């Protein structure tokens, strides 16, 4: 199925999911039955997400090892430094934007919602800390990391393995490299097959959420959601403007090329769902595999711009609801803490909420404030996931442009692209 057709079907599935979910929510009055029906819809999403997750680890390993192994050892460090420099800069900008918009728009003021009881179940803040994150990065077994789909551990092993191949003084292991290249190509083919089920997964995700919560939850938190999406829009404009400074008008061709993974990330609220398609579309755009196969997996672990901005925005929202004023110095301190802890959010369930829950007690903010945004977190996650996808696409493209690794023969994606490069 062609990308344009999948995009159209995803849009149809999105609208249909809202309509069916709303119909179920209004026609069923029993809360227990509503939950049961939503569970049946979520089966479709669960199956699709399992199909996606079975692709991720082998795809990351094959593309990353082949991309690094095909490079000379000197360029690896240079590309890695450029990527990490961009990631840190983007993270700081994202956090500052979250603070600025939360302070300016103050979405938490005027809320009269009561704080939940302290004994109520919230996300586990202890699920993430710097010590555990650092030690967890390094796998005790590569096969265990593959089996558990620990993408960050797979990335670490693949970097070591790829660097070892690139720095090997003897003849290159051609059989191994060709095998990895073929594996990557086959996994991309598997991705194309799995993506045919994307509209079904999107329909299930949206229908389940609307069936369970209805459309009322959107109006109830309209100010909070509106403020956050306005901040996301500003972040998108800044990222696009920054990319324009490096690649010029090619940024518009890039946005057109990655519209499918952007939509898929938004509809499913899962960066994993968009990863295989994003990798493929970046290569169609003309970014060589040695860059896309190296920078993109790193970005999925260290460059989640939308999620990072949400952590500062949500923490200040909770402080406003709780009527606890934080000084500018406290907010800057919070920003620096979030900058470090947010680097461990990849692969953690309810990742952004876990980071927020971890930082709240440091500033005497009520941890149960998480419950105020838990109900609409899925709708917020849709926007921040799409932002993560865009941020990683731009980071990969900028690094590729700085290395001169954007193929001028990508005219089949957009004829204007070749003209601009000529």
Image (spheres, helix red, strand yellow):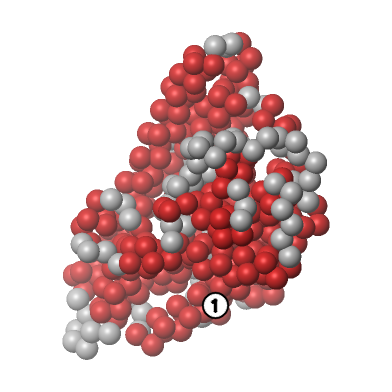
Mark 1, other Cα within 10 Å: few <14 / some 14–19 / many ≥20: few
Query: Where 399 falls versus 106 (above or below)?
Result: below
Residue found 45% across the figure and 47% down from its top: 124
Out of 327 and 310, give the one closest to the viewer.
327
**Where does the image place residue 328, in percent across and percent down from the top left?**
74, 68
Side (left or right) of 333 relative to 264: right
Side (left or right) of 337 relative to 298: right
**Where does the image place residue 176, in percent across and percent down from the top left?**
20, 69
**Where does the image place residue 69, in percent across and percent down from the top left?**
31, 75
Residue found 50% across the figure and 41% down from its top: 122
Answer with the quarter of the image where residue 325 lies: bottom right
Is residue 181 something that shows in the picture?
Answer: no
Q: Secondary structure at mark 1?
A: helix
Side (left or right) of 59 relative to 147: right
**Where does the image place residue 197, in percent across and percent down from the top left?**
43, 35
Out of 304 and 165, give the one closest to the viewer.
304
Out of 305 and 417, give the one closest to the viewer.
305
Out of 258 and 118, give the one closest to the viewer.
118
Is residue 20 something that shows in the picture?
Answer: yes
Numbered marks: total = 1
Tell me the quadrant of the picture where the C terminus can be found: bottom right
Residue found 72% across the figure and 32% down from its top: 220
Residue found 60% across the figure and 18% down from its top: 25
**Circle 1 sits on which residue?**
85
């Amino acid at each position: 199925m062609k990308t344009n057709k999948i995009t159209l079907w995803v849009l149809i599935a999105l609208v249909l999911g809202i309509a069916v979910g709303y119909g179920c929510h209004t026609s069923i009055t029993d809360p227990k039955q509503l939950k049961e029906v939503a569970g049946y819809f979520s089966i479709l999403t669960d199956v699709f997400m399992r199909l996606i997750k079975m692709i991720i680890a082998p795809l990351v390993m094959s593309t990353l090892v082949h991309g690094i192994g095909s490079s000379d050892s000197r360029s690896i460090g240079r590309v890695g430094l450029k990527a990490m420099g961009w990631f840190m800069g983007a993270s700081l900008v994202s956090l500052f934007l979250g603070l600025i918009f939360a302070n300016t728009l103050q979405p938490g003021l005027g809320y009269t919602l009561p704080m939940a009881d302290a004994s109520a179940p919230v996300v586990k803040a202890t699920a993430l800390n710097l010590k555990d994150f650092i030690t967890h990065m390094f796998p005790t077994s590569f096969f265990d990391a593959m089996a558990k789909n620990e993408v960050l551990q797979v990335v670490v092993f693949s970097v070591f393995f790829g660097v070892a191949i690139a720095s090997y003084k003897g003849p290159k292991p051609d059989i191994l490299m060709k095998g990895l290249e073929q594996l990557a190509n086959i996994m991309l083919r598997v991705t194309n097959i799995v993506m045919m089920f994307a509209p079904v997964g999107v329909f299930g995700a949206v229908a389940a959420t609307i069936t369970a919560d209805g459309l009322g939850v959107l109006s109830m938190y309209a100010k909070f959601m509106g403020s956050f999406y306005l901040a996301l829009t500003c972040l998108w404009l800044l990222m696009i403007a920054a990319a324009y400074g490096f690649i010029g008008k090619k940024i518009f061709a890039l946005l057109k090329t990655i519209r499918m993974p952007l939509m898929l990330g938004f509809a499913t609220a899962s960066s994993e769902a968009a990863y295989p398609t994003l990798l493929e579309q970046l290569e169609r755009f003309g970014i060589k595999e040695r860059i896309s196969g190296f920078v993109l997996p790193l970005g999925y672990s260290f460059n989640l711009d939308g999620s990072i901005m949400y952590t500062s925005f949500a923490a200040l929202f909770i402080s406003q609801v709780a009527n606890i004023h934080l000084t500018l110095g406290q907010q800057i301190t919070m920003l620096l803490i979030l900058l470090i802890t947010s680097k461990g959010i990849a692969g953690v369930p309810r990742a952004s909420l876990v980071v927020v829950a971890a930082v709240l007690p440091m500033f005497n903010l009520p941890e149960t404030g998480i419950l105020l945004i838990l109900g609409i977190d899925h709708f917020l996650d849709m926007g921040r996931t799409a932002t993560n996808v865009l941020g990683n696409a731009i980071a990969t493209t900028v690094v590729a442009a700085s290395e001169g690794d954007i193929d001028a023969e990508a005219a089949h994606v957009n004829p204007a692209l070749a003209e601009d490069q000529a």
